[in-house]
Amino acid sequence: MGKITGKELMAKLEKQLATDYDCKGSDYDPKPGAMWKDFPLCGLTYGERDGCVNENSPVWRDDVNEGVIELFYSYYKVIRDQLTEDFAIKYQNEYLRIVVQPDLEDTTAIVLFLQAKHKVIYCYDTKAWHFSWENADELATALEMDYNEMYDRVKECAHFTLL
C-alpha cells in the first residue's frame, strides 16, 4: 500500500488548487472540506454538476474541452506529484505523464504513464459530469484508492528506489 492517506492527499489537492487558481486554500476555513461547498474548485463539487464543468468554477473556459481537461488534470496532478515524490521519479530520468482526452459526445479518457519506460500506470474513462463526489470523505476515499492503485502499478512496472 501507499504511504499517504486520502485526507492527506485532499489537503495537498486543496493547497494545489488554491495555488493554481489563486483561490483561498484550507487556511480559509479550519473545518476540513468546508471551502469546497463555497468554492467549487476545478469543478470538484459535491453532488450533481450542471453540465461538464460548472460555469462558476475556476476551470471554466470558453472552450468546454479545455475546462474538462483542467477538471480531470487538477485531480490527477496531485496523485502524480505524490508518486513522483514517493519514487523520486524525476531524479531517475523518468517522468510520469498525464494525458486527458475529452470527447463531448462520449467519455473523457485519462491515462497516466511512465514516459521513458512506455508503461501505462493508470487508464480510466468517465463522463465529465459523473466526475464528482457527494462529500469530502467520498473525495478523500477516491483519491486514496486511485493513489494506491497507481502506487502499486509504479512499483510493479519500474524498479525505483523508494525515498
Image (cartoon, helix red, strand yellow):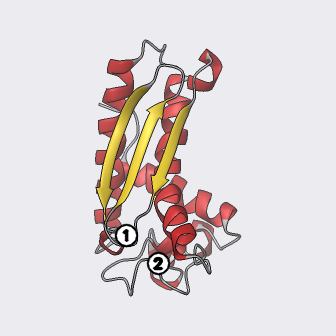
Please provide percent x and percent y for residue 99.
Answer: 49, 47
Residue nearest the observer in this picture, 12 or 61: 61
Q: Distance between the residues labelled 2 and 1?
A: 7 Å
Q: Residue at x 50, y 28 (%)?
A: 86
Where 139 falls versus 38 (above or below)? above
SS state under label 1: helix
In the rendered image, the quadrant that contains the N terminus is: top left
Q: Residue at x 31, y 83 (%)?
A: 48
Q: Would residue 110 be found to the left or right of residue 24 on screen?
A: left
Q: Which residue is drawn at 33% across and 43% down?
A: 123
| Residue that label 1 marks | 128
Residue 53, disc: 2
> Is residue 101 in view?
yes
Under mark 2, the amino acid is Val
Residue density around tag 2, few if under 14, some if 14–19, many if 20 or more, within 10 Å:
many
Q: What element carries label 2?
A: loop
Residue 30 visible: no
Q: Tell me: 76 left or right of 138.
A: right
> Which of the 4 image quarters holds residue 147?
top left
The amino acid type found where label 1 is placed reads Ala
Q: Residue at x 53, y 73 (%)?
A: 41
Residue 70 x/y as whole percent? 55, 63
Mark 1 crowd level (few <14, some 14–19, many ≥20, 10 Å Cα): many
Q: In this view, does 150 lie to the left or right of 67?
A: left
Q: Where is residue 94 in the image (x, y as percent from the top left)?
A: 57, 22
Front in this rendered view, residue 34 or 52: 52
Indicate the position of residue 51 as horizontal and vertical percent values: 39, 84
Please report contact status of discs 2 and 1: CB closer than 8 Å, yes or no: yes
